[in-house]
Amino acid sequence: MNISDLCQILEPTAVIGSTSGPVSGLFYDSRQVRSGGVFFALRGASVDGHRFIGKALEREAGAIVMETPRSLPEGVTGLVVPDTRRAMALAAAAFFGDPTKDMLVVGITGTNGKTTVSYLVESLLRDAGHRPAVLGTVDYRFEGEGLPSSHTTPESVDLMQTIAAFRGRGANALILEVSSHALEQRRVDGVRFDVGVFTNLTPEHLDYHGDLETYFEAKCRLFTGLGAHSPQQAVVNLDDEWGRRLAHMLPSVVGCGQTPRSSVTAENIAISAAGITGLLRTPCGNVALQSPLVGDYNLHNLLCAAGVGVALDMTPATIVAALASAPQVPGRLESIENDRDALVLVDYAHTGDALQNVLTTLRQLHPRRLFCIFGCGGDRDTAKRPVMGEIAAKLADVAILTSDNPRSEDPCAIIRQVESGLRRVHAGPWSLQQVGKAAGRGYVIIEDRREAMRFAVNLLRPGDVLLVAGKGHEDYQIVGDRRLHFDDREELRQALTTVTEGTCDSM
């Protein structure tokens, strides 16, 4: 790519300097700039990339893409554009050979369910003969080989480079979890979507978006804001009120859910600890449905995935076979083996809606006693903290409030905010000694997450259910500016093998 090519792609409102010369790479971090590279001065929520143009020039950037014009040294090209983020996305697509041009691309957005739906759709596409790559919350993977996931949807340069690498290895399909941040920040503007999926919308990321309406508008960009790159077909959960709003905005949708308007629905549903069974109804025919997934919310995930199959003209038999054989999703109601005759689960539920869905599902299993370990992350939406506390108090027999990823906040301050929701239901916390003797429902506070798990494991008896919520597949804990290795699944296995005698009276 030459700078002249970049000019044709970006159509800048002003050009400073010469448009000749090659482009060695695209960069949004001034510390990574190489000689002859193009630096994009991105405006962030707290940092303005225009402040780092000087640093990029020190590293011999050949061109600067910016929104606010400034003088540049001789030999450096300046391109002035209305939106540097969109410019970077379009430039990245071209620089890496427009890798999604000849791929089947499914984009999945929504507050909850994206990851589970991505695993289900991956199974669908594989069974239909495609070779899908997946970029999402858990990892970026292709045919058994994965890379750690830095973001649900990475910055456009990293996104296109990763897609191009998977394309070079033979991937002919792509499943992309699309976050609201990515849509708002134009990270996917260079991706050519074939199918878009909307799972649901519940309060989350309001610290960034401000309110639900703005959050919804960001999600809608996948379907209405990408121009020629917008999905040709939309699969929408019509059981969600925001999904119904989106459906009214689109010319046609594959509607999923239990509402009468849904073209992909299910009947005679039975949900148990063994999974979900029923009759899947589609415009192409009806067929028996069976899945090891558990819970009403996973029925919605299954129907959304089935909707993708319908949008891609797959047979109902192919759809249900793929849904039945989809692998366990890491950190989504992931079961931890134990010899206590108890059900021990790890789940990513970190919003009020997700926690309510999971706990409601587990209550339907009629456990002897339901324990829930949970917390809230720091430097994130504070409004959800008391909401999650109240939900845990209402649905768990014993809620164990602990630390999550406190980040730069004081863990005790976060816990106090969450506890205000618990106190809407309970007068106050039990002491640790009371838990074994107290009747009814209550809560305790154990700030140390590892100790919280050891305490809960000590209490387990046959027929109990223990849910550890919030971190799911994550293998780290962020405390201050430190990223420490911490995996709920590892910690539970360790606790289950080392704790042999309860410290509390038998319940």
Image (spheres, helix red, strand yellow):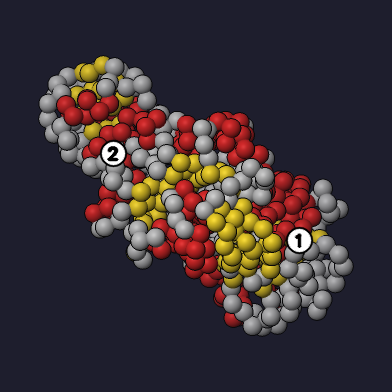
Q: Which mark is residue 93?
A: 2
Secondary-structure class at tag 2: helix
Please state which of residues 259 and 133 is positioned toward the viewer in this rendering: 259
- Res 243 → quadrant: top right
Please state which of residues 410 and 308 is positioned toward the viewer in this rendering: 308
Cα distance in 3D space between marks 1 and 2: 48 Å
Q: Which of the two labelled residues, at mark 1 and mark 2, occupies the earlier sequence position?
A: 2
Q: Tag count in the figure? A: 2
- State the image coordinates of residue 320 (x, y, percent, origin top left): 52, 63
- State the image coordinates of residue 14 (x, y, percent, origin top left): 26, 16
Which residue does the image show at 78% across and 55% down from the upper left?
A: 393
Secondary-structure class at tag 1: loop
Q: Which mark is residue 396?
A: 1
Work out whether residue 400 can be spotted.
no
- State the image coordinates of residue 402 (x, y, percent, origin top left): 66, 58
- State the image coordinates of residue 69 (x, y, percent, origin top left): 30, 18
**Is 208 placed left or right of 163 in the picture?**
right
- Res 182 → quadrant: top left
- Res 503 → quadrant: bottom right
Q: Nearer the viewer, mark 1 or mark 2?
A: 2
Q: Quadrant of the N terminus?
A: top left
